[in-house]
């Protein structure tokens, strides 16, 4: 993003006519390297030109896209200050009081768009990705401790555990009564997500390739569940009855709060991010930390670290987004692979490349590829069946 940020400032000052000799030479070099750039930039130097440019790229500039980007772009927009003087004759700057956020996004990604025009994704990768790699949806199964298993309907987003186990509209999953001591497991596959309201009223959102083990009825004095994978919890407050989540790497204890746990066995890191209330995170060996809102614990190699965190990023998946803030390509691709139910191999030299941006989890896979290409146009994708190779 640093190079794109620099180019944004160059283009902005070019339109203002506010460049010294050195920066003028930089812009001239850009125009030589990307011949169509000057033409498109100058087309935007009018209200009609701006509208035409945005219409040309409406896939990027839909209303839904702008709403999704509002939070993650806020710090960028705060750096790109548009303060048009009334004496400036250029119509586009006079209109930025209305179109400022749209124009900021348009200019910021303009350089990447030019790259995409001259270096399109491989046709095979684009075609197969769009046609074969659909986003995930409401898919899950429920397994009882006696081995009975039910594939849950994708017509519903979740189930409710009360006097009976049912979908949101009251449709029962079991005709017979269930023993109160029964343990249940809600499981989502790769490309699946599901919600559940536990018998105490706690709400849980389960991400792809995850499992939640819980009792049909909680024991007196404690509410204990076990998690494999990722889930967001809104715990119902019950004084003197702690809610405890155990994973393979930590134990999280609360009374009533909102938090996200990401603890896949195959991942090196396990995180607990707190949105509201307080949680106590413990490891074996009496290692304990209490989190405040806006903090997360990171467990790695049996050690725990406490960090400040943007909680919007931590729960973006629950809200239907992929949101990356300088996250490594290796980490990004693990999340993407789980949701689109594909295998992704990242070249060793690209694993630590940092990705910045946001896309809807319901966009086609090609949109995610474009986000990666925006970071480095030299990145290429090769698709073989349901396996994607990321390389240079």
Image (cartoon, rainbow, N blue to C red):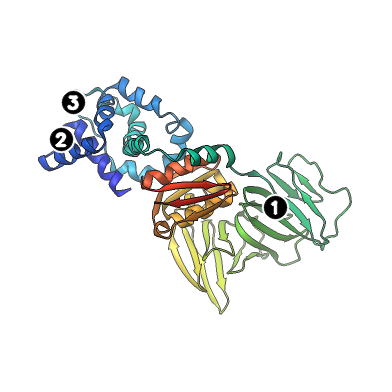
Residue 387 image offset from top left, x and y in percent: 55, 50
- Name the one closer to the observer, 206 or 223: 206
- Name the one closer to the observer, 92 or 177: 92
How many numbered marks are there? 3
Q: Is residue 185 left or right of residue 176?
A: left
- Determine which residue is flagged by label 3: 88
Q: Given the current orientation, which residue lies at the most extreme bottom position?
A: 285
Q: CA distance from mark 3 to mark 2?
A: 12 Å
Q: From the viewer's perspective, is residue 237 above or below residue 23?
A: below
The residue shown at (46%, 35%) is 65
Q: Label 1: few (<14), some or many (≥20) within 10 Å? A: some
- Determine which residue is flagged by label 2: 18
Q: From the viewer's perspective, is residue 9 above or below residue 266?
A: above
Q: Is residue 378 left or right of residue 277?
A: left
The residue shown at (88%, 48%) is 175
Q: Is residue 303 left or right of residue 54?
A: right
Q: CA distance from mark 3 to mark 1?
A: 59 Å
The residue shown at (40%, 25%) is 55
Of pointers 1 and 2, the one earlier in the residue sequence:
2
Q: Nearer the viewer, mark 3 or mark 1?
A: 3
Image quadrant assignment for residue 244: bottom right
Residue 337 image offset from top left, x and y in percent: 55, 51
Q: From the viewer's perspective, is residue 47 above or below residue 23?
A: above
Q: Given the current orientation, which residue lies at the most extreme right position?
A: 176
Of pointers 3 and 2, the one earlier in the residue sequence:
2
Of pointers 3 and 1, the one earlier in the residue sequence:
3
Q: Given the current orientation, which residue lies at the most extreme top position?
A: 48
- Determine which residue is flagged by label 1: 201
Q: From the viewer's perspective, is residue 277 above or below residue 138?
A: below
Q: Given the current orientation, which residue lies at the most extreme left position?
A: 21
At numbered mark 2, what does the secondary structure look like: helix, strand or loop? loop
Q: CA distance from mark 1 to mark 2?
A: 60 Å
């Amino acid at each position: 993003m640093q190079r794109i940020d620099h180019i944004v400032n160059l283009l902005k000052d070019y339109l203002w006519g506010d460049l010294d000799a050195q920066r003028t030479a930089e812009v001239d070099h850009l125009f030589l390297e990307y011949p169509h750039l000057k033409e498109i930039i100058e087309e935007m130097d009018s209200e009609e030109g701006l509208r035409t440019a945005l219409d040309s790229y409406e896939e990027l500039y839909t209303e839904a896209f702008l709403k999704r980007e509002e939070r993650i772009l806020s710090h960028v927009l705060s750096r790109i200050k548009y303060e048009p003087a009334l004496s400036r004759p250029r119509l586009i700057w006079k209109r930025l009081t209305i179109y400022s956020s749209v124009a900021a996004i348009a200019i910021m990604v303009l350089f990447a768009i030019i790259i995409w025009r001259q270096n399109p994704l491989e046709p095979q990768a684009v075609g197969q990705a769009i046609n074969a790699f659909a986003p995930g949806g409401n898919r899950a199964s429920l397994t009882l401790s006696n081995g009975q298993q039910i594939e849950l309907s994708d017509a519903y987003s979740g189930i409710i555990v009360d006097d009976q186990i049912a979908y949101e509209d009251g449709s029962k999953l079991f005709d017979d009564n269930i023993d109160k001591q029964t343990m249940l497991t809600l499981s989502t596959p790769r490309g699946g997500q599901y919600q559940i309201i536990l018998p105490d009223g706690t709400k849980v959102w389960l991400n792809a390739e995850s499992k939640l083990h819980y009792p049909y009825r909680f024991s007196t004095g404690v509410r204990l569940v076990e998690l494999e994978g990722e889930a967001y919890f809104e715990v119902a407050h019950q004084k003197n009855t702690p809610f405890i989540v155990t994973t393979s790497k930590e134990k999280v204890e609360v009374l009533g709060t909102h938090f996200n746990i990401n603890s896949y066995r195959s991942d090196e890191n396990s995180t607990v991010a707190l949105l509201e209330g307080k949680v106590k995170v413990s490891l074996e060996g009496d290692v304990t930390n209490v989190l405040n809102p806006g903090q997360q614990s990171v467990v790695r190699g049996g050690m725990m670290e406490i960090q400040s965190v943007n909680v919007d990023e931590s729960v973006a998946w629950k809200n239907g987004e992929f949101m990356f803030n300088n996250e490594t390509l290796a980490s990004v691709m693990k999340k993407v692979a789980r949701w689109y139910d594909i295998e992704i191999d990242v070249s060793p030299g690209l694993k630590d490349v940092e990705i910045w941006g946001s896309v809807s989890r319901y966009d086609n896979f090609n949109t995610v590829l474009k986000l990666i290409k925006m970071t480095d146009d030299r990145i290429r994708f090769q698709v073989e069946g349901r396996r994607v190779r990321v390389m240079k």
